[in-house]
Image (tube, rainbow, N blue to C red):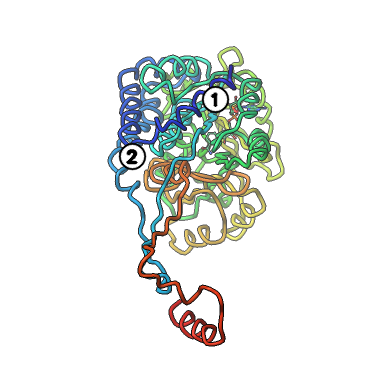
């Protein structure tokens, strides 16, 4: 069944169905209509899966994708224009250009935390580039998965776009098929499974993974303002955001001064009882709830923690842990939930050294008024992206590539970067047969010719 589905898509791709720019635009317009016509149903599904508030769904999923589609529709013609490059003098007269061609049939595998954005975001790029697509939503966001499986065929060309629902078994079957690109978002363990499966057909992969994104708060910054930004980025989607600040680094003095501002920002955003606040989400499932509550034993609980944990509703309140030891469990893995540990450092050097000891993160955030300090973090650490003064928002800038490095992933997307990811850049050289300016390089290589070649080619190249 899955094999037949992929074969059907390949036949459509081979028949040229997906290549015309008009077809691509129609798909993007269809997707835009889906998002706008069915916004309420999507918001309901996101609430069922993650307790996501409709406003948060609008900002981080639906509106986000509409903006990405609009940006793509506006620029597609320009992006698809071949890039002319100069031909070397020895080849003249000739012209050289780079043209983007679709790859073929691509597979997009999405996670549960932003189940609309992270499925349809890559699909936008894949369609804009002229590919046929199999989109595999996460089984851990079942309401959203079922809804997208129902809606996508109503708005997009079902001959060339398929949604295949399922869990490990179905994804394994998909990975047994030959694709021309696999775009995976999720954890690194499955990322390795995806990459291993891609090897047999030399299929290129994009891996959008996660990790512990550090946040440094320097002395002298406006701590009240910084705390609001951090609390917003951390507790959005109940902390289940790949680019959320995973932990804070600050000197003892800064950490002590920051603590009341963090607590105040949580209260301002979610009130004294976040459990009854419709703007605060829920943990996706029992497994993750148990994993997260297992991380509450480290440091001193300044807010939230056990008093704010209810297994029945999978509610875990915004939790702030102070004085967290560097070797504690909460610092050993990506938290991916509403727990914010604060680790003290001696200095900027100490903070940079600590970050460099870990895997390269998806994002690094720095709150500092000092250009020198910001530059040091920028040049002395490596991460997928950097945010100065604001977390998570870098991925809303359409002109910036979004992706990781090292353990946080490979490849990137959004805007024109998506088009690059889902296209082959074909090198094209055109040279007329007459006049034949290449006679010099044809054999036989007489002594005179050799001398001339060495003299002329070296000067021309
Ligand atoms: P998940 O459990 O939904 O898994 C992701 C996808 O992999 C799903 O579609 C699932 O069906 C599939 N899958 C799971 N096990 C598989 C297996 N054994 N074989 C084949 N396919 C399998 O999501 P997750 O991994 O829990 O997502 C959270 C992780 O993703 C975090 O580490 C987070 O940082 C990362 N993430 C990264 C980004 C990014 O853009 N870089 C975005 C969101 C999440």
- Is residue 256 visible from the viewing direction of this image? no
Tell me what residue is drawn at x 62 percent, y 34 percent. 187
Task: Count numbered badges in the picture.
Answer: 2
Q: Which residue is mark 2?
A: 72
Q: Residues within 10 Å of mark 2 (few under 14, many from 20)?
A: many
For this rendering, which residue is in front, 163 or 382?
163
Tell me what residue is drawn at x 55 percent, y 30 percent. 109
Relative to 258, residue 57 above or below: above
Q: Residue furthest top?
A: 312
The numbered mark at residue 7 is 1
The numbered mark at residue 105 is none
Pointer 2 with pointer 1, Cβ within 8 A: no
For this rendering, which residue is in front, 174 or 49?
174
Residue 68 coordinates in the image, percent (x, y): 35, 36
- Of the numbered discs 2 and 1, the one sitting upstream in the chain is 1
Which quadrant of the figure has residue 39? top left
* Rendered-image quarter of ligand 1: top right
Relative to 29, residue 143 above or below: above
Mark 2 Cβ and ligand 1 under 8 Å apart: no
For this rendering, which residue is in front, 205 or 114?
205
Tell me what residue is drawn at x 40 percent, y 25 percent. 57
Mark 1 Cβ and ligand 1 under 8 Å apart: no
Q: What is the CA distance from the residue labelled 2 to the residue labelled 1?
A: 28 Å
For this rendering, which residue is in front, 375 or 341?
375
Residue 237 coordinates in the image, percent (x, y): 48, 28
Instruction: Answer with left or right where residue 413 lies relative to residue 327.
Output: left
Which structural element holds mark 2? Answer: helix
Relative to 327, residue 93 above or below: below
């Amino acid at each position: 069944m899955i094999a037949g589905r992929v074969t059907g898509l390949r036949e459509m791709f081979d028949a040229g169905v997906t290549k015309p720019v008009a077809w691509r635009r129609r798909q993007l317009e269809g997707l835009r209509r889906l998002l706008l016509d069915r916004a309420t149903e999507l918001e309901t599904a996101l609430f069922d899966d993650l307790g996501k508030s409709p406003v948060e769904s609008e900002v981080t999923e639906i509106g986000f994708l509409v903006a990405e589609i609009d940006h793509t529709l506006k620029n597609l013609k320009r992006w698809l224009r071949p890039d002319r490059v100069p031909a070397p003098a020895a080849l003249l007269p000739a012209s050289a250009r780079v043209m983007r061609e679709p790859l073929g049939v691509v597979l997009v595998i999405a996670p549960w935390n932003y189940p609309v954005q992270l499925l349809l975001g890559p699909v936008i790029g894949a369609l804009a580039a002229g590919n046929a697509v199999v989109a595999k939503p996460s089984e851990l966001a079942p309401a959203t998965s079922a809804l997208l499986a129902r809606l996508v065929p109503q708005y997009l060309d079902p001959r060339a776009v398929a949604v295949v629902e399922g869990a490990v078994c179905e994804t394994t079957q998909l990975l047994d098929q030959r694709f021309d690109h696999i775009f995976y978002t999720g954890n690194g363990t499955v990322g390795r499974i995806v990459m291993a499966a891609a090897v047999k057909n030399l299929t290129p992969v994009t891996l959008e993974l996660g990790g512990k994104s550090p946040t440094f708060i320097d002395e002298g910054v406006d701590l009240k303002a910084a705390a609001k930004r951090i609390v917003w980025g951390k507790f959005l989607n109940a902390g289940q955001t790949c680019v959320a600040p995973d932990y804070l680094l600050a000197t003892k003095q800064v950490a002590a001064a920051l603590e009341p501002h963090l607590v105040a920002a949580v209260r301002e955003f979610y009130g004294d009882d976040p459990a009854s606040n419709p703007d605060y989400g829920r943990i996706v499932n029992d497994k993750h709830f148990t994993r997260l509550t297992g991380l509450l034993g480290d440091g001193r609980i300044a807010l939230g923690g056990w008093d704010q944990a209810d297994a029945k509703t999978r509610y875990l309140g915004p939790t702030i842990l102070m004085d967290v030891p560097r070797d504690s469990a909460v610092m050993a893995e990506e938290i991916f939930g509403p727990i914010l540990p604060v680790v003290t450092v001696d200095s900027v050097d100490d903070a940079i050294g600590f970050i460099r000891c870990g895997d390269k993160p998806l994002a690094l955030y720095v709150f500092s008024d000092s250009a020198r300090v910001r530059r040091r973090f920028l040049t002395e650490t490596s991460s997928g992206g950097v945010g100065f003064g604001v977390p998570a928002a870098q991925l809303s800038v359409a002109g910036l590539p979004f992706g990781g490095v090292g353990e946080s992933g490979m490849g990137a997307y959004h805007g024109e970067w998506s088009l690059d990811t889902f296209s082959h850049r074909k090198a094209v050289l055109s040279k007329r047969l007459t006049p034949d300016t290449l006679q010099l390089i044809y054999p036989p290589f007489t002594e005179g010719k050799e001398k001339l070649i060495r003299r002329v080619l070296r000067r021309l190249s």
